[in-house]
């Protein structure tokens, strides 16, 4: 069956159209993205602004039309950190659903981590043993670990690359202070993740990690999803220092970096380095599947 998965993230709205069936991998058929930057569309009271809501409604209505044109019979629509944390989240969801006719749902941080973990488990399989999964989004960092399809531990921390850029670096606070803050927050939750034992395989997903790996020498997306891609901590540590003094225009020219995310790559790299250091990881495997695939796989399992 042809299905659409509509992901309203803190940075981007992304409709992924796939051909899917239970027992096989979803095959991408079409992608429709828009840099909504919802995390930057919050007022002083942490409410989504009228402009932000208008842009969101416009995109979701267009995404539904695209999905229909591509033959989708089902659209799974969800929103993550930026909408979840907004004080007017209920109003935002109601307005979007009324305008689009969709059933946009807000995922909790724990569900984000759990569903991303499911996608990674299906991609790497049982032979990977105990997985540790890391996902840096625009608004939050998700960490999950376990030996089954559902993680033993799933944590969400307010350490998204966009959030930290806005609240720390663009607010004039130092990168050194941000580094200490990030490490304190991750360390506070690390014990629960590590209590189950060391990881047999540590994995990173989503755009920030993919971009960091690409900058550090991983194969480009044009070489396909099955190429082995790794992010090494030594390379990342050197990159963190380089990004500190680079302008967004120069960062956008690096391989794997999109212009709309260039300004938050430094904060994302600080989070990635902290996670690898505090969990004692010399490398992370990059998984092409993430939250969207996890949402789709769980839906197919329930059919």
Image (cartoon, rainbow, N blue to C red):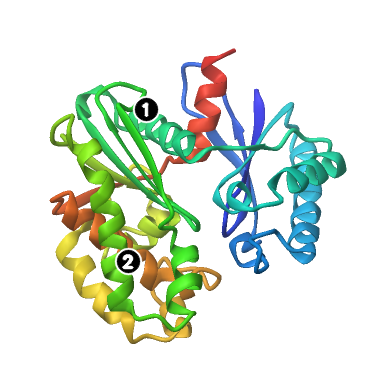
Instruction: From the image, state whether disc 1 or disc 2 is nearer to you.
Output: 2
Q: Is residue 228 visible?
A: no
How many C-alpha atoms fall within 10 Å of the one at disc 2: few (<14), some, or many (≥20)? Answer: many
Q: What residue sits 24% from the left and 37% below the top?
A: 193
Query: Is 98 rendered above or below residue 197?
Result: below
In this picture, is 144 found above or below 136? above
Residue 166, horizontal then vertical, whole percent? 51, 72
Quarter assignment of residue 30: top right
Place of residue 54 in the rendered image (x, y in percent of width and height, measured from the top left): 81, 59
Q: Position of residue 100 (x, y in %)?
A: 83, 42
Q: Quadrant of residue 233?
A: bottom left
Q: Residue furthest right?
A: 99
Going from N to C along the chain, the mark reached first, 1 or 2, is 1
Of 211 and 158, which appears nearest the observer? 158
Numbered tag placed on residue 162 in the rendering: none
Check disc 1 and report its element: helix, strand or loop.
helix
The answer to whether residue 10 of the structure is visible from this angle is yes
The C terminus lies in quadrant: top right
> In screen coordinates, is 294 left or right of 74?
left
Instruction: Give the residue displayed 69% in from the left and 59% down from the top.
Output: 47
Q: Is residue 97 above or below residue 46?
A: above
The residue that mark 2 highlights is: 269
Relative image position of residue 163 (x, y in whole percent): 49, 64
Q: Quadrant of the N terminus?
A: top right
For the point 37% across and 85% down, the residue is 246
Q: Nearer the viewer, residue 249 or 46?
A: 46
Task: Point out which mark residue 122 bears.
Answer: 1
């Amino acid at each position: 069956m042809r299905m659409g998965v509509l992901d309203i993230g803190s940075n981007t709205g992304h409709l992924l159209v796939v051909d899917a069936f239970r027992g096989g991998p979803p095959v991408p058929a079409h992608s429709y993205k828009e840099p909504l930057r919802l995390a930057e569309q919050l007022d002083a009271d942490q409410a989504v602004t009228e402009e932000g809501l208008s842009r969101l409604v416009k995109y979701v209505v267009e995404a539904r039309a695209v999905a229909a044109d591509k033959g989708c019979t089902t659209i799974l629509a969800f929103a993550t950190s930026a909408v979840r944390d907004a004080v007017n989240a209920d109003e935002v969801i109601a307005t979007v659903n009324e305008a689009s006719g969709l059933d946009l749902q807000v995922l909790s941080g724990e569900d984000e981590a759990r569903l991303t973990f499911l996608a990674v488990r299906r991609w790497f399989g049982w032979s990977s043993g105990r997985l540790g999964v890391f996902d840096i989004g625009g608004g939050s960092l998700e960490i999950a670990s376990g030996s089954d399809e559902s993680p033993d531990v799933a944590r969400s921390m307010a350490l998204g690359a966009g959030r930290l850029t806005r609240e720390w670096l663009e607010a004039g606070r130092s990168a050194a202070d941000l580094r200490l803050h990030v490490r304190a927050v991750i360390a506070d939750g690390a014990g629960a993740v590590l209590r189950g034992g060391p990881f047999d395989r540590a994995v990173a997903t989503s755009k920030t990690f993919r971009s960091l790996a690409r900058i550090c020498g991983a194969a480009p997306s044009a070489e396909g999803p099955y190429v082995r891609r790794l992010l090494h901590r030594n390379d990342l540590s050197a990159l963190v220092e380089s990004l500190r003094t680079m302008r967004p225009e120069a960062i956008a020219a690096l391989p794997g970096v999109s212009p709309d995310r260039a300004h938050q790559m430094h904060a994302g790299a600080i989070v990635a380095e902290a996670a690898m250091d505090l969990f004692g990881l010399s490398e992370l495997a990059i998984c092409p599947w993430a939250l969207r695939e996890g949402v789709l796989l769980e839906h197919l399992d329930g059919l």
